[in-house]
Structures are given as structure tokens and as C-alpha cells.
């Protein structure tokens, strides 16, 4: 069935995100979310952001989550990235329940297995581009020279070889986001989460960043989960999930765009 | 270098450029606190040492008196003392006689200290305190040789080679309510700075035999001045000697001066009072770090998203407090040294110490390793404690809370 947006079927507001793409049938589940609920207290009332969301993320896939502002897609990404915890339900990474991990283990999980790119670049103002990219590697325990070497290689890869010693206030929006991408990739994560990565950029820079994402995940064979409301961007993904009011409402498989 | 230390150093380096004036005031407060403590401890320690050295140089570590007339020969008495306290290194026989000095219309009560010259040169520190003349006690028609304190010389306007009279009141066997007087002429052969104001004003040092002759004591002496290996054990040895020798002997150690008791109490009180400056400065640093946490909500959020653990965040704040404490300590200590130098200079040029009030005519500034260690340790502890609350606040912050904060 088509919902008019070129997107696939929905079933009582909850999609079976496990059995959607024929290509995914052969892939291993890297991460899954089961019955995720998230409720925020707002004054005297409550805001039910996620209403029992299920999700499977497969090794090496590029998944896009779309939806209007306030639909709950960023909240879901935060929960998947262990930046926030669900009020109900659980997240499994390689069959390991994240709720069972201590704060220290969660930090190791985020550092080693995940990479994050946010709408705002969130670079540290006092650190130059190279140091910003080095940070996760230093947190992982890499020595200063090793971290520096890795960060330099990644910055070269994202086209910022000549801007390594520039501070965030000396870089353009597109450059800042490229530094943020390099930082997210420095520890060779298994999943790269990007929350509206082109949201603050003009169309030209947005296109550069999009291309960069796809180039990098091809080169590095990592799993990409992007949250966006840019439908044009979403069309480049093989699997797109639409969220509305805290639930999945549609899924689209762009088979022709398989990576 | 650990990542948290690298990060802290980087933050501190860049943070100093954008630190607010309040942060700088807190830091200056810390430096001044450490400097004040350094100066105060150096002055008190210097005062203590000046006083201690003066007493030991003039009277030895211990003085053992014998009441009554019969007393063993000095060598026998020394052997007796050494059998009780083997750590005794030397003894100097002495007499002390109170007399009245009279010169050019002025009179003043004085204490004549007669010592075995040879032994005094070897074991006491009077000779090294000579500022004029020589450590010799010639007998001539003009008078008997005597060394006078610099205060006494100033009061009576005496110079080396000058002669003055001493009057010794003695008991009149025929009339108990009357007294006889014995006069003697003395020649100033040297002027000494005995360190302690009271000594400089009242003490006259001469040879044992001259003092015995003047006081008509024959070959009797009052007791022994005792030197030991470790001055800090003087009290313990003194108590042992007093217990063993019995009631007819009286033992005094260099610490018997009430001032030492006062210093013992005052020094830690002064330390604690001045530590309050450091505590206030550290509280200001703590509030600066708290502001830092709030200002860095977003940074802490992203650091946590990148894999910084709560422990790592804590370490960063601890390191910041530690580094601020360390730099504050070093700069404060250096500033304290400068203040000490200024104090010493003022003392030399203006004579800021009134000997009649403070008992010493000058204080040698003394920086003790123990004092410096205490200042360093307590300052570091306070700085570290001041980081606990901000560090825990930062560590507790959820990553998503930080990321939402713009």
C-alpha cells in the first residue's frame, strides 16, 4: 500500500520494521529497540513523546527517519545512542540490553561503538579542528600522537587538511559540520547517528555534507542512521521510516538506492 | 599524558583568556592567602629560632643549678650528669651574680655571667656574637675585662676600652637588715649582640675566675651549662636529670621561657586564621567552577556523547581545582618570599622590631620545609574540596540535558 508519500504500509500505527526490505532479510540485526516509551513531565501534565516504538537496525544499512518537528525522532535517536533512557522498553545492541550497563560502560559504548553528528556542530570552542576530532580518540585511550595522526587523516578525508589548526569561530557552517563528522568517525564507530545534520546549512553545503555521508559510509562500511525532515535527503536512503506523534506511520524501501 | 589531564590543561590555558574578573579575583585571593601564610609562618618560625639561638648561645641547652654551698668539682659534676644523660656533649661551669652598674650618673641592675672562658669559646656561641672588641678578659689596673651586651653599651654610652663600675650588694653578717657593698672596676673588652633584648640590656659576660673573685665566691660555682646533641630533646633530658638528681638540684631548659609556650599555641592559631583567607578564595573558586559547569552544559553534553564517563568529567574538574591550587601555591609562595625580603629589608633599614616589646631586636626570617609543606597541603586540600560539588554536578548531568542547552 502506498500512503501518498511514496512510502510503505503501516499497521495500526506500528510498523513491523523487522520484515521490510528483502535485502535486510540477509543482514544481521546490529541494534533493536523494543516497545520504547518516553514521557516528559511538563508542568502539571505529561508529554508522551514515544509510544511503544520498535525498530531494527541492520549491520551496514543506511536508515533515515523522517517526521515533523516534535514527532519524537530525535528523542528516539537519543535513546538509541544511550544519551537518554526510555521510560519503558529496551534497546539492544548486539543483543546486549543497554539498560543493564553502568554509566561507565555506557560511556565506553558511546565512545567505541557510536558516532554522533548533531544539527548544531557542538564543537568545543577552545579547541581547534584537529583537537576537536582528537577528543573521542583521546577518551578512548589513544596516545596524543596516535590520536593526532588519526584526526589528521580524517580531516584530510573530509577536505579540511588546510584548516586543522582553525578554531570553530574561524570555520564556515559547512566546515564545522565536516569537522563534526570527522570527530564522529575518529573511533571507527559501528553506527553513525546524525540528527538533522544539514538542518543549519544552505542547500549547497547541505548537498556537500550529504555526499560526504554516503562517501564515508561506503568507504568505512558503517551503519548510518539519519534523522531529518529534509525529504530530498531522505530519498537517497534505501530505507526510510516516518514517525508521527511518537509512532511509526510509514516505511519506504528504495531498492534502487541500495548501497 | 592522561586524556583528562590533557583536556584540563587545554581548558585552563584557553580559559585564562576568557576568565571573568571574578575568577581572577578568586585566584588573586588564593595567591595572597598563601603569601600571607608563608610570611606569617616565616616570621613566627624566625622569631622562635632567633630566641632559641640566643638562649642556647648564651646559656646552653640546659642549666643545672645546685642549691646550697656544697657542690662537686666541675669535672665530677659533669661525669655525674653524663651518667644520667649520656647524650650530653659538653658542660661549662658558670656563676651568675646580680649587681648594679654605675657610670656617669646612670645606674642599672645587671647580671654578671662568669663562664669558663676556654669551654665557653668551645661550646657556647657568645664569641660569634661579638660585634666589637675581642673575647678576652684581661686584668689590669684599669679594671677587669668584661664583655657587655649592645643594649647595655648603648644605654651607658660605652665603647671598647671604656671603664665602668659595678656595685655588688652583699649581706652584712652583723646586721641582717643592712647590706655591705663591694665595688669593682671593669674594662669593656668587647660588645656582643646576644640576640635577646633582655640579655643585651642586662648581661655582662666575664671569665669565671673574675666573677668568682668579684662576688667573693672563692672557687665555688653555681652550676653547669649543658650542651646536648639534639636541642629538641632538652626538655626530656632536663626532666630526667631533675628526677635523678633530686630536690637540691634545679634544672632549666632553653624552652623554659614562656615565649616558647606562647609561640607553640600562637603558631597553629595564626595558621588557621590565615587559612580562612585561602578557604574564602577556594569558595570563590568553587563558585567560579559552578558557573563553569553551567556555562559548559553543552560541552559536557557533547563530551558525554563522545564517551566521556562521569568519572572522567569529575577528574577534569578535580584537575582544574588541583592546577589552580598548584599555580596559586607556587605564585603565593614566591610572593611570600618577596614579602619576606621586604620585611627583612625594612627591619634592617628602619628597625621595625622594638626589642623592649618583642624581646628580640631583630627577627631572622625562616622558611621551614614543614611550614611550607603544611601550607601547600592544606591549600591543595581546600582547592580540591572546592571542586567536589561542581565536579559532581557536571558528572551527574545527563548528556541529552547538556545537548539541549544552547
Image (spheres, rainbow, N blue to C red):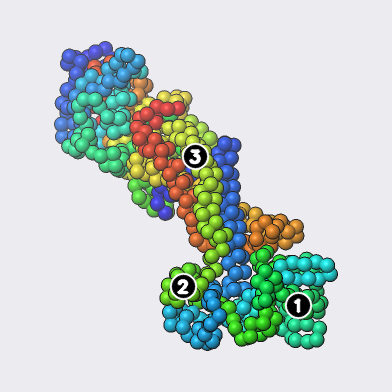
First reached walking from the N terminus: tag 3 or tag 2: 2
For the residues tagged 2 and 1, is the chain the same? yes
What residue is drawn where x is 46% and y is 35%?
A: B290
Tell me which corner region of the image, top left, top right, bottom left or bottom right, holds residue B390: top left
- Left or right of residue B370, residue A240 in this image: left
Image mark count: 3
Question: Do we see residue A243 in this rendering?
Answer: no
Label 2: how many Cα within 10 Å (few below 14, some 14–19, many 20+): few
CB under 8 Å between callouts 3 and 2?
no
Residue on which disc 3 sits: B283
Q: From this viewpoint, which residue is outermost toward the right?
A: B104
Q: CA distance from mark 2 to mark 1?
A: 34 Å
Residue on which disc 2 sits: B247
CB under 8 Å between callouts 2 and 1?
no
For the residues tagged 3 and 2, is the chain the same? yes
Q: Which mark is residue B276?
A: none
What residue is drawn where x is 78% and y is 82%?
A: B143
- Left or right of residue B86, residue B19 in this image: right
Amino acid at each position: 500500500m502506498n500512503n501518498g508519500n511514496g512510502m510503505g504500509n503501516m499497521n495500526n500505527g506500528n510498523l513491523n520494521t523487522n520484515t521490510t526490505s528483502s535485502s535486510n532479510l540477509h543482514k544481521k540485526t546490529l541494534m533493536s529497540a523494543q516497545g520504547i516509551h518516553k514521557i516528559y513531565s511538563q508542568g502539571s501534565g505529561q508529554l508522551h513523546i514515544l509510544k511503544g516504538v520498535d525498530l531494527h537496525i541492520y549491520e551496514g544499512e543506511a536508515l533515515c527517519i523522517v517526521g515533523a518537528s516534535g514527532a519524537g525522532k530525535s528523542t528516539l535517536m537519543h535513546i538509541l545512542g544511550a544519551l537518554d533512557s526510555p521510560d519503558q522498553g529496551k534497546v539492544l545492541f548486539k543483543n546486549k540490553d543497554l539498560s543493564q550497563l553502568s554509566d561507565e560502560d555506557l560511556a565506553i559504548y558511546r565512545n567505541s561503538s557510536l558516532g554522533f553528528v548533531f544539527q548544531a556542530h557542538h564543537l568545543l570552542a577552545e579547541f581547534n579542528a584537529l583537537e576537536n576530532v582528537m577528543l573521542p580518540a583521546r577518551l578512548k585511550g589513544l596516545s596524543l600522537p596516535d590520536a593526532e595522526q588519526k584526526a589528521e587523516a580524517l580531516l584530510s578525508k573530509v577536505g579540511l587538511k588546510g584548516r586543522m589548526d582553525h578554531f570553530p569561530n574561524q570555520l564556515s557552517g559547512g566546515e564545522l559540520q565536516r569537522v563534526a563528522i570527522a570527530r564522529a568517525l575518529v573511533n571507527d564507530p559501528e553506527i553513525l547517528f546524525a540528527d538533522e545534520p544539514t538542518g543549519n546549512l544552505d542547500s549547497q553545503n547541505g548537498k556537500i555534507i550529504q555526499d560526504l555521508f554516503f562517501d564515508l559510509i561506503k568507504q568505512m562500511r558503517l551503519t548510518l542512521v539519519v534523522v531529518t525532515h529534509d525529504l530530498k535527503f531522505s530519498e537517497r536512503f534505501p530505507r526510510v521510516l516516518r514517525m508521527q506523534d511518537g509512532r511509526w506511520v510509514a516505511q519506504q524501501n528504495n531498492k534502487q538506492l541500495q548501497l | 599524558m592522561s586524556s583528562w589531564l590533557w583536556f584540563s590543561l587545554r581548558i585552563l590555558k584557553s580559559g585564562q583568556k576568557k576568565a571573568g574578573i571574578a575568577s581572577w579575583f578568586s585566584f588573586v585571593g588564593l595567591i595572597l592567602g598563601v603569601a600571607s601564610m608563608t610570611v606569617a609562618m616565616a616570621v613566627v618560625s624566625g622569631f622562635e629560632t632567633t630566641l632559641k639561638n640566643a638562649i642556647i648561645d648564651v646559656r646552653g641547652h640546659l642549666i643545672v643549678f645546685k642549691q646550697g654551698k656544697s657542690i662537686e668539682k666541675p669535672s665530677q659534676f659533669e661525669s655525674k650528669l653524663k651518667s644520667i644523660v649520656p647524650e650530653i656533649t659538653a658542660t661549662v661551669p658558670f656563676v651568675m651574680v646580680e649587681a648594679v652598674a654605675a657610670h656617669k650618673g646612670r645606674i642599672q641592675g645587671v647580671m654578671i655571667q662568669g663562664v669558663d672562658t676556654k669551654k665557653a669559646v668551645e661550646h657556647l656561641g657568645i664569641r660569634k656574637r661579638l660585634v666589637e672588641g675581642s673575647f678576652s678578659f684581661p686584668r689590669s689596673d684599669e679594671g677587669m675585662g668584661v664583655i657587655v651586651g649592645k643594649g647595655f653599651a648603648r644605654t651607658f654610652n660605652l665603647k671598647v676600652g671604656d671603664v665602668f663600675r659595678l656595685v655588688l650588694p652583699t649581706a652584712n653578717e652583723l646586721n641582717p637588715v643592712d647590706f655591705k657593698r663591694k665595688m669593682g672596676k671593669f674594662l669593656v673588652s668587647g660588645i656582643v649582640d646576644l640576640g635577646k633584648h633582655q640579655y643585651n640590656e642586662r648581661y655582662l659576660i666575664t671569665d669565671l675566675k673574675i666573677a668568682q673573685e668579684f662576688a667573693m665566691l672563692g672557687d665555688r660555682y653555681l652550676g653547669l651549662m649543658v650542651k646536648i646533641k639534639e636541642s629538641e630533646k632538652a626538655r626530656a633530658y632536663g626532666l630526667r636529670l631533675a628526677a635523678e638528681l633530686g630536690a637540691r638540684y634545679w634544672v632549666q631548659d632553653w624552652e623554659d621561657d614562656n615565649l616558647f609556650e606562647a609561640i607553640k599555641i600562637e603558631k597553629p592559631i595564626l595558621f588557621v586564621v590565615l587559612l580562612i583567607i585561602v578557604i574564602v578564595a577556594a569558595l570563590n573558586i568553587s563558585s567560579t567552577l559552578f558557573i563553569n559547569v553551567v556555562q559548559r552544559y553543552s560541552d559536557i553534553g557533547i563530551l558525554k556523547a563522545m564517551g566521556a564517563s562521569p568519572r572522567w568529567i569529575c577528574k577534569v574538574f578535580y584537575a582544574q581545582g588541583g592546577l589552580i591550587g598548584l599555580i596559586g601555591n607556587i605564585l603565593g609562595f614566591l610572593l611570600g618570599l618577596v614579602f619576606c625580603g621586604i620585611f627583612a629589608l625594612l627591619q634592617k633599614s628602619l628597625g621595625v622590631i622594638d626589642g623592649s616589646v618583642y624581646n628580640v631586636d631583630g627577627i631572622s626570617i625562616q622558611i621551614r620545609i614543614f611550614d611550607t609543606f603544611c601550607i601547600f597541603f592544606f591549600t591543595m586540600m581546600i582547592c580540591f574540596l572546592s571542586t567536589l560539588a561542581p565536579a559532581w554536578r557536571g558528572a551527574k548531568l545527563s548528556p541529552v540535558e547538556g545537548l539541549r542547552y544552547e
